[in-house]
Image (cartoon, helix red, strand yellow):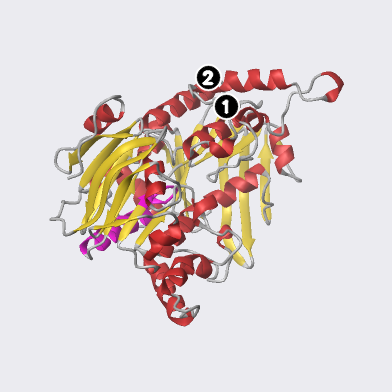
């Protein structure tokens, strides 16, 4: 019997930060041509483990063997040079550089005299994007792209390198179903070429669709490793969180209350046009659509982050001119942004400060901030959301992605907004935290709040929304009831072009 040799092996890896141990005797093996899925709740240790593999962190103890050789001085440059590529959950680009420059970053082709060969750089970038099926302008600064397209650029950078191991940390968090399928085709092709892949995702359906083996982490320990066919969704959740959670239950629609928000013919030329809808108390309205459909742009315009050319916005029946997020907050509107890293948090400030920012803005009177009351409020909300953190004074950059997402959500809950716009509210959030966020959304609805929820996760839209707006090419092409919506119906609307949007109801 032939014994397989792992391309990558970790033995008894331990890691701690400031005296808090986050990894305990982790052992892990990865083989050529294998898709090994790493799952666990936020804070379970997944990101720390892959940062040790990529050389960003150094283990306190234990051994890492790569291609049969024990590596003692692992660092990011060594990992890249030896074929280990990592795509982190937080998008890592240089916004001012072009798409082609970002794809070549750190691996620029050189020509005569040691200068960058710009023609070769563009050809390489175009080749990898064409293989991915991604239609992205090579000359556009990455900072002007939507988050999903930025993620495509990061993936293209990794694919442009000579690699033996590819690590993907929540790669589909901002992707639509069609984009996920494109990525899965790429992953399967890489697997057939013998590439070893570590795949991290909180979307359990993806794990069963793409994975070969699963390793489960809980509180820094490996609780179980096995072939995908040894698990079902219930046993996987049980191994992750120690309890059963059902995310498939469809919440029944309730009778909406008074109108809170009315949008009439809102237009920004070249981005979206004639947007009409109504949002009422005790109502969650989902917004579905492909990347580029205009969902996030409409949301940003509603809170005054981006300008509009025409159209009207009414709050509680009164016409409003909202030219800044500060004005929106004063009127009782808040938005959880699509990109928490750039727009939702101040990474070098504490958990408490980040959660309190909007409450301070809304609660200050004549320059006086009721700081003691606000701290008590945000600490309670943080506890309710079960945010995991080393200390309330810890900088938020040291939290896991999912816990950072919950801090952003806490910020708007503390401000007591009546209208909440949630753009990808469960992006990068584990199954347990996702369940808590869903319960919170339903509780807010029962308390009379109105929620506009943008999501690329169709099961999430179908289980949480009372009504569903479908967008395509900057227009609303469908307004579906809770009872009449299906994944097939939503996708058929999202893929069509030219249909007139329904009037605001």
User: Left or right of 36: which side holds 163?
Assistant: right
Taking the magenta stretch, the answer to whether it contains residue 434 is: yes
Residue 458 sits in quarter? top left
Against 497, residue 304 (above or below) is below
Residue 131 bears which disc, if any?
2
Q: Nearer the viewer, residue 363 or 156?
A: 363
Q: Residue at x 40, y 47 (%)?
A: 301
Residue placed under numbered mark 1 in the picture? 195
User: Left or right of 440: which side holds 309?
Assistant: right
Residue count near mark 1 (Cα–Cα under 10 Å), binned few <14, some 14–19, many ≥20:
many
Q: Residue at x 26, y 42 (%)?
A: 276
Numbered disc 2: secondary structure: helix
Against 180, residue 131 (above or below) is above
Q: Nearer the viewer, residue 304 or 112?
A: 304
What x and y, as percent, mark residue 168? 53, 38
What x and y, as percent, mark residue 13? 62, 52
Which is in the foreground here, disc 1 or disc 2? 2
Q: How many marks?
A: 2
From which residue to which does the magenta span run? 422-446
Calculate the distance from the C-alpha at mark 1 to the C-alpha at mark 2. Answer: 16 Å
Q: Quick check: can you spot residue 184?
A: yes
Tell me the quarter of the image containing the C terminus.
top left
What x and y, as percent, mark residue 311? 32, 44
User: Left or right of 302: which side holds 428?
Assistant: right
Residue count near mark 2 (Cα–Cα under 10 Å), binned few <14, some 14–19, many ≥20:
few
Q: Residue at x 36, y 55 (%)?
A: 321
Numbered disc 1: secondary structure: loop
Taking the magenta stretch, the answer to whether it contains residue 491 is: no
Q: Nearer the viewer, residue 231 or 199?
A: 199
Assign the magenta stretch its main secondary structure: helix
What x and y, as percent, mark residue 198? 53, 37
């Amino acid at each position: 019997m032939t014994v397989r040799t792992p391309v990558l092996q970790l033995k008894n890896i331990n890691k701690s930060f400031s005296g808090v141990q986050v990894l305990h005797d982790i052992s892990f093996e990865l083989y050529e041509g294998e898709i090994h899925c790493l799952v666990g709740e936020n804070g379970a240790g997944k990101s720390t483990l892959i940062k040790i593999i990529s050389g960003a962190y150094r283990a306190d103890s234990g051994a890492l063997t790569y291609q049969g050789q024990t590596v003692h001085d692992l660092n990011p440059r060594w990992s890249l040079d030896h074929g280990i590529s990592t795509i982190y959950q937080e998008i890592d680009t240089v916004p001012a550089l072009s798409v082609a420059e970002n794809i070549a970053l750190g691996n620029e082709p050189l020509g005569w005299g040691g200068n960058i060969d710009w023609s070769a750089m563009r050809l390489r970038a175009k080749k990898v994007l064409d293989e991915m099926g991604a239609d992205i302008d090579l000359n556009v600064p990455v900072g002007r792209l939507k988050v999903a397209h930025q993620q495509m650029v990061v993936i293209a950078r990794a694919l442009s390198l000579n690699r033996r191991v590819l690590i993907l940390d929540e790669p589909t968090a901002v992707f639509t179903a069609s984009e996920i399928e494109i990525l899965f085709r790429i992953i399967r092709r890489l697997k057939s070429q013998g590439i070893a892949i570590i795949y991290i995702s909180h979307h359990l359906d993806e794990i069963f669709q793409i994975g070969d083996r699963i390793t489960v982490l809980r509180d820094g320990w490996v609780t179980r490793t096995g072939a995908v066919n040894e698990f079902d969704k219930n046993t996987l959740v049980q191994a992750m969180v120690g309890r059963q959670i059902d995310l498939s239950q469809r919440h029944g629609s309730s009778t909406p209350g008074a109108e809170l928000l009315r949008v009439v013919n809102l237009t920004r030329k070249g981005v979206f046009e004639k947007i009409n809808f109504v949002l009422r108390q005790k109502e969650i309205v989902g917004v579905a659509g492909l990347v580029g459909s205009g969902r996030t742009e409409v949301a940003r315009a509603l809170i005054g982050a981006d300008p509009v050319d025409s159209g009207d916005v009414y709050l509680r029946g009164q016409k409003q001119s909202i030219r800044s997020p500060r004005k929106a907050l004063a009127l009782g509107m808040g938005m959880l942004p699509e990109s928490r890293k750039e727009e939702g948090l101040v990474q070098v400030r504490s958990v408490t400060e980040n959660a309190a920012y909007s409450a301070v803005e809304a609660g200050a009177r004549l320059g006086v901030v009721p700081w003691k009351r606000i701290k008590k409020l945000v600490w309670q909300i943080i506890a309710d959301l079960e945010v995991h953190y080393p200390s309330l004074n810890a900088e938020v950059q040291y939290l896991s992605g999912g816990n950072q997402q919950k801090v952003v959500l806490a910020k708007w809950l503390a401000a007591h907004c009546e209208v909440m716009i949630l753009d990808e509210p469960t992006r990068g959030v584990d199954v347990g935290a996702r369940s808590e966020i869903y319960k919170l959304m339903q509780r807010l609805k029962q308390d009379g709040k109105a929620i506009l929820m943008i999501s690329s996760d169709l099961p999430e839209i179908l289980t949480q929304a009372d009504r569903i707006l479908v967008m395509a090419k900057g227009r609303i092409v469908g307004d579906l009831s809770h009872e009449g919506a299906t994944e097939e119906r939503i996708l058929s609307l999202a893929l069509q072009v030219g249909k007139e949007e329904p009037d605001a109801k």
